[in-house]
Image (cartoon, grey):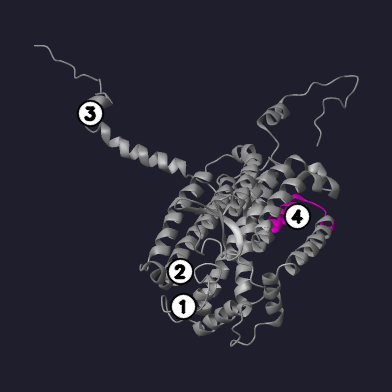
Amino acid sequence: MTATRPSSRTPTPAATPSGDSNAPRAAVVAVRRLFAAETPEYFMLLGTTLFLVVFGLVMVLSSSSIESYVNTKDFFTTATRQGLYALIGVPIMLIAARAPISFWKRWARIAVFAGIGLQLLVFSPIGYSVQGNRNWIHVGSFNAQPSELVKLAFVVWLAWVLTNRRDILDDWKRIALTIGPLAGIAIGLVLAGSDLGTSIILVSIVFGALFFAGTRPRIILTAFVIISIVGTVFVLIRPSRLSRVQAWLGGCTDPAQQNQACYQISHGWQALAHGGVFGVGLGNSTGKWSWVPEADNDFIFSIIGEELGLVGGILVLLMFVLLAICFIRIIRMSRDPFAKIATSAAMVWIVGEAFVNIGVVLGFLPVLGVPLPLVSAGGSALITSLAAIGVVLSFARTRPDPDDVDGSFSAVQRSSSRRPSRTNASDPTRGRDLP
């Protein structure tokens, strides 16, 4: 009788009936790798952005319900459309967050030409005006505001130019010749469509990029004075703009004023005053009953103040302050000048636009027609703002090498710096590593 030894061979995965159970797990791992990040700045910026988007959807639903019913017999028309824009914009942001920095550098110049080309379309048969501003295009059921794409293009293009041409930062003539033509054409096309508010934001993005790139303050101050004079001329030559500025200088302190210049700001103040400290409750605004013009867009902050009170208004302000802190931390963390300049330009755009909008509602600035980023109704503004934040998230996804001081210290340079240097007996200083 002979004993048989048990086989030591193990069954192959194909032979096990549970082999297919690893597929869902592998898919989960792939998704985790796709959106993986290792810095708190990444999650801090992502969380703040998603909070503002969700908060904006709730407030758009509340502020637009009455006007939507009046226009379409459906309370949810505007809110549904805004939700669709968010479903498009958030994946774009997450995909952009995975792009390497080389991708943005490669497409920066193409982006600004594409933005200018689309802005030219507003003067074609598919372009149309909204309240006197010819800044929109319409194709079938698709509406878009090309100037929002110009803002996004400015973020990466200015970073690309000012990174590659750092030798121009001390010479205003070379700055003007390098970025002046394309920036001037883009801003000029927006001004030709009578959109002064967007033009101001575009100019602010240029100034912000120049400042964080290290341009001399004297050059920036001189350019600011010149552009302020040009802006004043554009205000004086258009009666509607001049009336807004005059109403702002006059204060619009009498709520009974029913002229066109003071109507919007006066009723916005009434809505804010009606809210008090804790608000009248979500959905209970009276200003949205056709009293506050653009209640779901430019003046949505007045509805926030009415329904959620001073507490809600302060919460919105704090969220944008937190957004600014996220941007600043990413600027300080980054080693590549391109990432620093692009992040600063995006910060000036989004955070600056938010405080301009709130300043208009509170009466600190004249009415400019600037939306509240991530909160106001509007597909072009929401999608491009989320895309810009996605660009910044791509810089914050991984923590840079502390040895990489300026973003140009490549792996080749690192490897060459580790090589032993040859010495020469006749020259004891030759081959010695420099500090």
Q: Is residue 171 visible?
A: no
Amino acid type, callout 2? Met
Q: What's the residue at 58%, 79% (across, down)? A: 263
Stretch in magenta: 202-218
The residue that label 2 is drawn on is: 59
Q: Are marks 4 and 2 in contact (CB under 8 Å)?
A: no
The residue that label 1 is drawn on is: 307
Q: Counting residues from the N terminus, which is met first, the one under dot 4 or under dot 2?
A: 2
- Label 3 vs label 2: CA separation? 54 Å
Q: Residues within 10 Å of mark 3 (few under 14, many from 20)?
A: few
The residue that label 3 is drawn on is: 16
Q: What's the residue at 60%, 71% (across, down)? A: 358
- Label 2 vs label 1: CA separation? 9 Å
Quadrant in which residue 285 is drawn? bottom left
Label of residue 57 in the image = none
Q: Are marks 3 and 2 in contact (CB under 8 Å)?
A: no
Amino acid type, callout 4? Phe
